[in-house]
Image (cartoon, grey):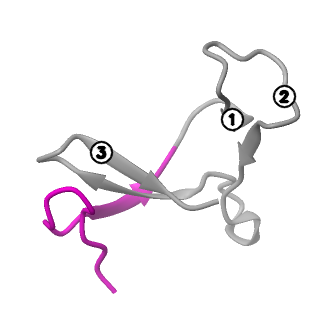
Amino acid sequence: MSVLCPNCGNKMEEGSLCGKAPILWSEQPLAMFRGGGDVTLFGNELFGNGFPVAHLCRTCRRVLVEY
C-alpha cells in the first residue's frame, strides 16, 4: 500500500527513522529526559531494528512516522 503525502499528494518513499535510542518526540527542544507529555517512538522489535517505519516526501521535505 502506498502512502500519499498529505501536503502535496505525491507518493511517499518508505524507510525507517533511525537515530540513537531513545527516539523521542517532545514539545521541549533538546529534551534530555522523558517528560509526562513526551512520546517515545519504537520500531518493530520483532525484526530487531527498534526504529519506526517512516515515509518521506522529497518534494515537501516531510517525514511521517507512526508509533
Name the residue type under label 3.
Arg
- Chief SS of the magenta region: loop
Q: Is residue 62 left or right of residue 27?
A: left
Q: Earlier in the sequence, mark 2 or mark 3?
A: 2
Query: Label 3 neighbourhood size at 10 Å, few (<14), some (14-19), many (20+)?
Result: some
State the image coordinates of residue 63 (x, y, percent, origin top left): 36, 48
Q: Secondary structure at mark 1?
A: strand
At x 74%, y 43%, the residue is: 39
Q: Earlier in the sequence, mark 3 or mark 1?
A: 1
Name the residue type under label 1.
Leu
Name the residue type under label 2.
Arg
Q: Secondary structure at mark 3?
A: strand
The residue at which mark 3 appears reads as 62
At x 76%, y 36%, the residue is: 38
Seen in the picture, residue 31 relative to 37 is either above or below; the reply is above
Range of magenta residues: 1-17
Q: Label 1 to label 2, Cα distance in Å?
A: 8 Å
Seen in the picture, residue 27 relative to 14 is either above or below; the reply is above
